[in-house]
Image (cartoon, grey):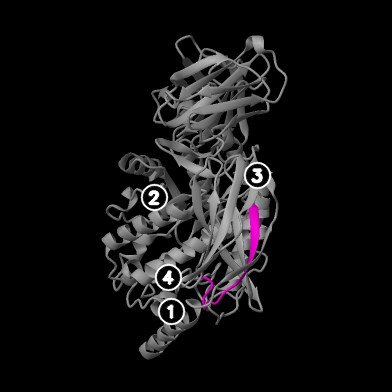
Amino acid sequence: MKFTKLFTLLFFVIHFTLTASTIQPEIIEITNNTTSLSTFDKFESIIKVKAEYTNPYDPQDIDISANIKLPDGTTIDYPLFYQGVEGDVSEWGLRIAPKSEGSYSFTIKVITGDQNATSEEQTFTASDSEGLGFLHTVNNNFNNLVFDNGSGFRGFGLNMAWEARNSENPKYTYEYWFDLLADHDINFIRTWVNAPWNLPIEWSKPTSDRYNDYDGVGYHPEGLERIEYMINEAEKNDMYLMLAMDFHGALWVNNNDGWGNNFWNVHPYKDLAGCVNPNDFFTFEEARRLYKNRLRYFVARWGYSTSVAAIEFFNEVDNTIIYSGQNVNPADVVEWHSIMGDYLKSIDYHNHIVTTSISHNQINGLFDVNELDMIQSHIYGAVDNMSQVITNMTNTHKKPYVVGEMGLDYLPPNNNDEGKWVKDLQKTMWLGMFEKTSIIPMTWWWENYEVWNAYDKFEFLSEFTKKMTTNTDSERADLSFVNSEDLNAKGMIIRNRHAYVFVEGNGSNLRNITLQIDGLPENDYTFYVYNAYTYELKEEVDVSASASGKFYIELKDISANEDVFIYLENKRGDITGVEDNLKTVGWHLYPNPAKSTINYKIDDVFNPTNAWFSIYDLNGKVMTQASLEQHSNINLDVFPSGMYVFKIVSDSFEDQKLFIKQ
């Protein structure tokens, strides 16, 4: 085996030296899909090339990239990806989603050994659009994610980690799942990429009958096409994806969970990188280079997609360490994440969220790696401790924290226990809605909930998740409760207007209990009391909050052990929020991010005698305020770098957007 690997390596070295370094590459043709498009849409170019190479997936063999000049005059190098070959002409793709309006230009460069070729300049123009853009984390905002256009977002969904094997249930495809989940108002999915049985990239002999063995050079073509299909399905359904790029079992020496998830003995890096033990995956330079190549290919081919929300390096990376026979050094795992995070951010123009996950065993220093934008762990059988875990993780690491997996148990459900599992799912999501987490905790057992017809339970929760989603942290405030009962109550007010409360009975009879809530504006309200699990409307009452902000809810018809959700609808509105009876106007704020000036333009006709704009920092401080015009620009030279709220108000409309001052 060692002789074979050495011979193969020598062959590639000799081949590379004798051919690639002496033959001049040639760019035959460039075909662009358009010369003008909207921001965040896909610009695509097909480049035909004549060149000598052995492995088109390895930039050390053949490196093709675009040098792109952005509208602000800066330039980036963006990788291309291999699409196929016909005769001696190979085809390569450039895909990018422009993030700002203006003119773009680019040249293509091909490098093989010490030879290279550069194309003529190509151009395209991007115009401003109403597109949301890509999702990002925001410093010190742990409640929600933010799109490029400033709109807030909370992920509401679950794990749909893989497609079933054809021999198990052929209907369980990404198309089936994404259609089903979108029909139930689910917008966020976590799935596994490059698993031996799902979306294999480097695994040449997949363990799923959806894929054939592959004996060629480079990545598994069926796995690549299946990823393409998955992302297309996500885009059609407005689904956002967290993509786990590796899983712990890929590095397992032994069958630690009894499910046959130990794949180290057939891991591709044993041959390709010369790895001997699992720790070599994290430390060998060749293993690191191969992993970077995979990230590079992914960014080149699918980085354009706004449906790709987050790239997760590892599922439960702590499980590569803790078991006997692994001999993985935690410090090496931490260093590897820093290296890969730095590399990914250096090539990813679209700035996708970077994350990783653990099961429940902390790795010293891992979640403090600067390059990780978001951190996650998995919680099973501990719904009552979940809120404390979220608080502790957020406070300790000062980063957005997500419960990436959850459920009543990590072992498969007994279908006779459907009621317990579904209630645990609902309670977990209710509690998550009131915590500082940008993605509502995601359950694992996606197929069981389909068998139980339980996805109907998601829609009510999704509706109120959207109502409780803000653009900035300052738009959300916790409510305080005063009562003498042994109740666990959580509540918040959004934009100083509508309020939301979840009350656990904890075995107490909630009948005829008066709940005092402090912190509401003095306004008229209708409060709606729902059973938290059946969604039955139990009470609907019109009441008023006092001048002191105190509000009293009398629960008259609630049974023991009945958890309830209370929605307090503000009937009069408040100037600090966007009132429901005011329409949202068409308007643009650009460029975003901005440097020295920012422009606004109002599309609709309005009365300028009673209209103004205000700019706030994220603490609510007014930075500037002036009368609103149809079109104007604001000087930002005195504004510190950071994120701001741009709010417009008139007698006929009211709206706000976030922008970034660089």
Check whether the beta carbons of the residues at disc 1 and disc 2 lie within 8 A of each other: no
Q: On screen, 584 above or below 258?
A: above
**Image quadrant for the C terminus?**
top left
* Residue 278 is a magenta residue: no
Sort mark 4 into few (<14), some (14-19) or many (20+) by Cα contacts within 10 Å. many
- Tell which circle, 1 or 3, labels the residue nearer the N-terminal end: 3
Q: Is any part of residue 264 visible from this angle?
A: yes
Q: Is residue 165 left or right of residue 260?
A: right
Q: Identify residue for label 2.
A: 372
Q: Nearer the viewer, mark 1 or mark 3?
A: 3
Amino acid type assigned to the residue bearing label 2 in the image: Leu
- Residue 504 position within the rendered picture, expressed as x and y whole percent measured from the top left: 46, 35
Using the rendered view, name the quadrant where residue 646 is placed.
Answer: top right
Q: 531 and 131: which one is in front?
A: 131
Using the rendered view, name the quadrant where residue 394 is placed.
Answer: top left
Q: CA distance from mark 1 to mark 3?
A: 48 Å
- Tell which circle, 1 or 2, labels the residue nearer the N-terminal end: 1
Q: Identify residue for label 3.
A: 125
Tell me the magenta residue range. 41-57
- Tell which circle, 4 or 3, labels the residue nearer the N-terminal end: 3
Identify the disc placed on residue 266. 1
| Disc 4, SS | helix
Q: On screen, 96 above or below 126?
A: below
